[in-house]
Image (cartoon, rainbow, N blue to C red):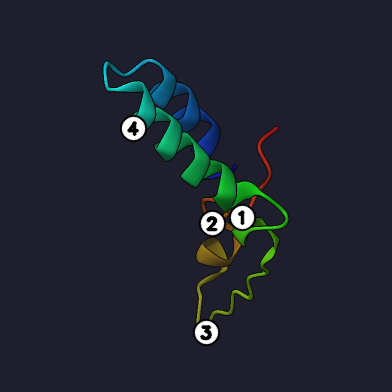
Amino acid sequence: MALGLGERLAALSSQNKPLSQVLNRREALHQLISPTGLGSFGVLVQSKELTAKQALQCLKGLTTPG
């Protein structure tokens, strides 16, 4: 969700496309965020030789929207 999937779902609803195509795309996005689908995987992020400034920067998508 932190990568903007909620906004993408909203944008799909407002597109002027056939209803079946919109529903298929919405279902695909819902599967990505579903805990029983791909939404339950974990991520390990590692780094090497970062400067102090780089180490303090947040990576997009690794924070929860507030």
Residue in the picture at 60% in, 60% down:
38
Q: Nearer the viewer, residue 55 or 64?
A: 64
Tell me the residue that label 1 is attached to. Answer: 62
Check whether the beta carbons of the residues at disc 1 and disc 2 lie within 8 A of each other. Answer: yes
Report x, y in % for residue 1: 59, 42
For this orientation, the residue located farthest to the front is: 20
In the displayed structure, would residue 25 be above or below residue 52?
Answer: above
Are the two marked residues, 1 and 4, in contact with CB atoms closer than 8 angstroms? no
Left or right of residue 64, residue 5 in this image: left
64 in relation to 35, above or below: above
Residue placed at 40% from the left, 23% from the top? 11
Decide: marks 2, 4 in contact (CB < 8 A)?
A: no
Residue 59 is marked as 2
- Measured Cα–Cα span from mark 4 to mark 3: 43 Å
Mark number displayed over residue 21: 4
- Give the SS element for disc 3: loop
Considering only order in the chain, which callout, 1 or 3, is on the residue closer to the N terminus?
A: 3
- The amino acid beneath tag 1 is Leu
Residue receiving disc 3: 48
Q: Rounded to the nearest whole Å, what is the CA distance between mark 1 and mark 4? A: 30 Å
Closest to the camera, between mark 2 and mark 4, is 4
Q: Nearer the viewer, mark 2 or mark 3?
A: 2
Q: On the image, which quarter does residue 62 sit in?
A: bottom right
